[in-house]
Image: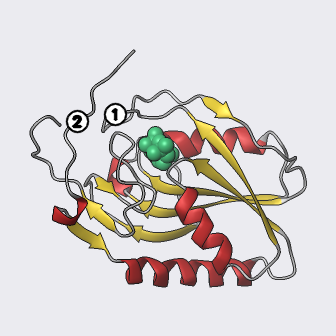
């Protein structure tokens, strides 16, 4: 079924929330913290597709301890800007995580429904430990109690794009993090 996309908005016209340099600095800092916390151990990073792909790529390269990575995919918000509330696994991990130190990697922690669901699912695999790393955290949007162990930035309730994050699948490749305007015709 053909669906029409909302109008394209030039990302350069959007307000920058975090610059490339600010993001890089925070990711480096989290990578250093993880490297200290897991010194001498192996970490499995599990990215949640698709939004976390770019953050995971940078985070993995900022970690100096042994690490591997895997991906899961869950049902998406699609074009809606708010959570449907229902989360479903679309792609599971490829490799077993029993007895391993796992970090779930997200681009954004919003209502918490996605990570809460994934945390429960991953714990069933009996990892040695399970932590959460997220690029952005919107604490005021939380519907279920869940906290991130490693966070780049806490943000207010604004809709953001870039650095992996999309609106209607667009703008993921924008290198910085920008605020999608509230009032755009067709949105
Ligand atoms: C976003 C984000 C998280 C989830 C967070 O995914 O990547 O997975 O929403 O929201 P929550 O805390 O309210 O559950 P989205 O459904 O937009 O898919 P995407 O990763 O493919 O962009």
**Vertical side of 122 occupied by 108: above or below:** below
Across and down, in percent, residue 26 comes to 48, 80
Q: From the viewer's perspective, is residue 58 above or below residue 92?
A: below
**In front here: 128 or 64?**
64
Q: In this view, does 28 lie to the left or right of 158?
A: right
Q: How far is mark 2 from mark 1, CA to CA?
A: 9 Å
Q: Residue at x 16, y 53 (%)?
A: 181
**Residue labelled 2 has its Cβ within 8 Å of some atom of ligand 1:** no
- Residue 79: image tag: 1
Q: Position of residue 184 (x, y in %)?
A: 11, 44
**Residue 65 drawn above or below residue 175:** below
Where is residue 10 drawn, in percent x and y? 20, 57
Q: Tell me if I can see residue 113 in this picture.
A: yes
Query: Of marks 2 and 1, which one's residue comes earlier in the chain?
Result: 2
The quarter of the displayed image where residue 57 is located: bottom right
**Residue pictured at 36% horizontal, 70% vertical:** 176
Res 157 quadrant in image? bottom left
Left or right: 26, with 62 as reference point: left
Residue at 19% across, 62% down:
14
- Which residue is under mark 2? 6
> Relative to 133, is 125 above or below?
above
Residue 148 seen by the camera: no
Mark number, residue 4: none
Secondary structure state at the residue bearing disc 2: loop
Q: Which residue is drawn at 45% across and 55% down?
A: 108
Say which quadrant the C terminus sits in. Answer: top left
Q: How many numbered tags mark residues here?
A: 2
> Disc 2, disc 1: CB below 8 Å?
yes
- Kindly state the secondary structure of the residue where label 1 is placed: loop
> Which residue lies most toward the top here?
1
Tell me: 104 left or right of 144: right
């Amino acid at each position: 079924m053909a669906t029409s996309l909302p109008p394209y908005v030039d990302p350069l016209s959007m307000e920058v929330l975090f610059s490339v340099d600010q993001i890089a600095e925070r990711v480096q800092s989290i990578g250093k913290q993880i490297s200290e916390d897991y010194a001498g151990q192996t970490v499995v990073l599990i990215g949640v597709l698709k939004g976390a792909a770019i953050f995971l790529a940078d985070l993995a390269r900022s970690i100096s301890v042994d690490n591997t990575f895997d991906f899961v995919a869950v049902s998406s918000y699609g074009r809606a800007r708010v959570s449907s509330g229902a989360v479903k696994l679309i792609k599971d991990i490829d490799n077993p995580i029993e007895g391993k130190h796992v970090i779930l990697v997200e681009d954004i922690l919003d209502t918490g429904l996605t990570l809460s669901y994934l945390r429960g699912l991953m714990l069933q695999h009996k990892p040695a430990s399970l932590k959460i790393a997220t690029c952005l955290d919107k604490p005021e949007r939380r519907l279920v109690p869940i906290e991130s162990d490693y966070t780049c930035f806490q943000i207010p309730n604004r809709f953001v794009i870039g650095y992996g994050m999309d609106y209607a699948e667009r703008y993921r490749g924008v290198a910085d993090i920008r605020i999608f305007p509230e009032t755009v015709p067709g949105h």
